[in-house]
Amino acid sequence: MGIKISAIEYYLPVNERTNADLERLRPEWDIEKVTTKTGVEKRHIASNGETALDLAIEATEQLFRTNSIQKDEIDGILFCTQSPDFIMPSNAFLIHERFGFSEDTWAFDFNLACSGYVYGMSIARGFIESGMSKNIMLITSDTYSKHISQKDRSTVSLFGDGAAVTIISEDSSNQSEIISTKLSSSGKDYKSFFIPSGGCRLPKSEFTDSESEDRSGNIRSLENIHMNGFAVWKFISKKVPKQIKEILLENELGIEDIDFWAFHQASKLTLQSLSSALNLPEEKLYSNLVNIGNTVSSSIPILLKDAFDERRLKRGDLVIISGFGVGLSWGTMLLKY
């Protein structure tokens, strides 16, 4: 039995923030230098009151408008987010209610960021291969802009908001297949990318709302994302190529055998480092970072959708997808698209 990505749709907020906008807001920043490192010139930002659920609803409505699958064919809903609408219940149940899914359709959230798509695909694979489900809706949606200090150059210039919906299905024709997966974690490095307050460990207060400036001139509070960009980049550059090489070796494949590489769109610097470490041919790489930024767990499905629509990716291609980030966590999947 094969497993395939039946459909992908995504939604980006209407509001856009360009580098020119950032330069007007923060004239002391060297925007040209920022652009060179991030590779981002524009990102989409959720408006006040617009949540990860709202973005997911838009993407799901688009999916049902443009694809033949019906809601009564969906057996389960996976929702990956780090910016949920409520502490409880999870966003998957709110999607379930919004679209009137059957009580037989299971639903739950999982909390991951940039590795979330690979992990979500792996969870869906388990449900399908066990015979529990045939069609699973994997939703990835985040509004990181609500966690970011507007005075933090390292994050405000990089991240964009967005949502993607992927239908993962049983493929009786066996033309598509998830061949192999590797998932990894390094909890000891969690402080490289985290939000210190807002949970039960350190609730929000006047103290956590107080801002401070780091050695690089970034200003943020304990309620904002704290990202050690250099530490995360160094970690990814060391761990991700190793994991990819392992999955290729185990499947007796070389770099030249892979038709398409779908990396999480972390930053231009990160993508260049991975490409160099693996000696990847430029024609097999694809990036859409410049106009949407780093959209966290949605970056890989958005990339796949854009590449497929532009005929850079086609059915039957051998594909490596790789996501990495908060946790720290990283995962690689080899599949026949």
Image (cartoon, helix red, strand yellow):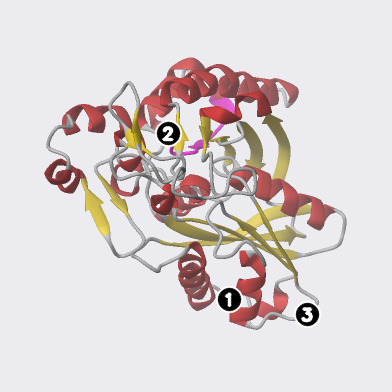
Residue 222 lies, in percent from the top left, at 46, 40
Q: CA distance from mark 2 to mark 1?
A: 30 Å
Check residue 103 in the rendering and tell me which mark sits there, or answer none: 3
In the picture shown, does residue 202 fall above or below 190? Answer: below
In the picture shown, does residue 10 fall above or below 117? Answer: below
Image point 38% across, 51% down: which residue? 145
Residue 278 lies, in percent from the top left, at 51, 19
**Image mark count:** 3
Q: Amino acid at mark 2?
A: Leu
Q: Amino acid at mark 1?
A: Ser
Q: Nearer the viewer, mark 2 or mark 3?
A: 3
Which of the two residues, 304 or 309, is positioned nearer the viewer here? Answer: 304
Image point 48% across, 74% down: which residue? 66
The range drawn in magenta is: 256-266
Q: Circles 1 and 3: CB distance less than 8 Å? A: no
In the picture shown, does residue 275 fall above or below 120? Answer: above
Q: Is residue 186 visible?
A: no
In the picture shown, does residue 207 fall above or below 67? Answer: above
Q: CA distance from mark 1 to mark 3?
A: 22 Å
Residue 154 lies, in percent from the top left, at 34, 33
Check residue 68 in the rendering and tell me which mark sits there, or answer none: 1
Residue designated by label 2:
285
